[in-house]
Amino acid sequence: ANQYPRPGIAYRPVRDAEPIAVRLAWWRDDPHPATQAAVELLTTLYRNG
């Protein structure tokens, strides 16, 4: 809801649902300079819910 707000859409948490796997991918041979920072940020955000 915070990352993809849309007018007229109501987001509701589903508290008894199983967690969803989240994946992050990048080119192993040519990672973006901010790749490590993105990994750390997303790990923190998704770990803390």
Image: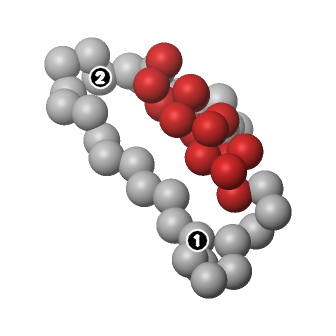
Outermost residue toward the bottom in this view: 29
Quadrant showing the N terminus:
top right
The quadrant holding residue 27 is bottom right
The answer to whether residue 8 shows anywhere in this view is: no
At x 62% / y 38%, what residue is drawn? 40
Label 1 close to label 2 by CB (< 8 Å): no
Q: Position of residue 16 (x, y in %)?
A: 18, 19
Instruction: Check disc 2 and give the amino acid type.
Output: Val
The answer to whether residue 41 shows anywhere in this view is: yes
Nearer the observer, 38 or 49? 38
Instruction: Check disc 1 and give the amino acid type.
Output: Trp
Compared to residue 15, the image places residue 3 above or below, namely below
At x 68% / y 51%, what residue is drawn? 36
How far is the residue under mark 1 from the one under mark 2? 30 Å
The quadrant holding residue 12 is top left
Secondary structure of the residue carrying numbered label 2: loop
Q: Residues within 10 Å of mark 1 (few under 14, many from 20)?
A: few
Q: Position of residue 8 (x, y in %)?
A: 62, 36
Outermost residue toward the right in this view: 33
Disc number for residue 14: 2
Disc number for residue 26: 1
